[in-house]
Image: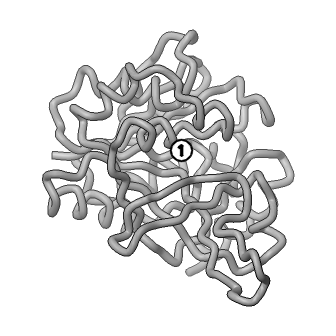
Amino acid sequence: MSTVIIPARYASSRFIGKALALIGGTPMVNLVAQRCLQSKADRVVVVTDDERIAEAVRTTRAECVMSPSELATGTDRVAYVAKNINDDIVINVQGDEPIIPPSRIDEWIAELERDPSLEMITACVAFKDEAMAQNPSHVKVVMDSNGNALYFSRLPIPFDRDGNINPIRYRHIGIYGFRRKFLLRYAQLGKTPLEQAESLEQLRALENGVRIKVIKTAYEPVSVDTPEDLVAAEQYSGVLHNG
């Protein structure tokens, strides 16, 4: 059994109230929930600390859970919900991913079902634009030959020292699948040095020796972090609606 959990805060640091920003006339968090409801997951739950978001979500078929406002991260909010469910597989989809393909969620669920030893999974896509690869806002990931993460960084890794290799660089897509038992343990681990240096939560898992499987995908995320990002989201929403 599997559950998709969508953390959605109102007080986003870069875009206050972005979960309720309208895309094609629909609150963004509702669009994310609707996409997740089209996946094979058994449940979809939005977790929020704001009644305005909860009120919007109640117009969908997704469940809504109110969380304490003092929870520091999205992972903490996802773990808060996971404590009270029995499903073995938990997929964490950010509330600012309005075009997440349901088929990708199905892929992550299937991978966790296929490999019982796998505790954590995520995804990546090859950069098509070198300028984006140089941007520290876009997180990079390098993997071993089996597709397991070696490191995540805001720097453009791997570094081409001699300038003649032209390596493929992969953008990390910040959507995760967890084994529920591991998620609850992970949320209790203290912050680690690399995590603090890069400000990347997933490094906490690597620093504690946890294997993270990274699935390569063609999905180009359209995350909404600023009001300007709404323009691209509106364009994609129109393509999806008309297609």
Vertical placement of residue 33 versus 54, above or below = below
**Which quadrant holds the C terminus?**
bottom right
- Residue at 59% of width from left, 37% of height from top? 194
Along the viewing direction, whichever of 181 and 225 lies nearer the viewer: 181
Left-right relation of 44 to 55: left
> Which residue is tagged 1?
94
Q: Residue 12, position in %: x, y?
A: 71, 30
Viewer can see residue 186: yes
- Residue at 44% of width from left, 59% of height from top? 149
Q: Residue 235, position in %: x, y?
A: 74, 69
Residue reaching furthest bottom? 164
- Residue at 36% of width from left, 29% of height from top? 186
Displayed quadrant of residue 69: top right
Viewer can see residue 62: no
Q: Residue 7, position in %: x, y?
A: 50, 33
Displayed quadrant of residue 146: bottom left
Along the viewing direction, whichever of 63 and 219 lies nearer the viewer: 219
Along the viewing direction, whichever of 216 and 148 lies nearer the viewer: 148
Vertical placement of residue 122 versus 120, above or below = below
Secondary structure beneath disc 1? Answer: loop
Going by the numbered disc 1, the residue's amino acid type is: Gln
Left-right relation of 193 to 177: right
Vertical placement of residue 118 versus 233, above or below = above
Left-right relation of 53 to 150: right
- Residue at 53% of width from left, 44% of height from top? 94
Q: Residue 41, position in %: x, y?
A: 26, 52
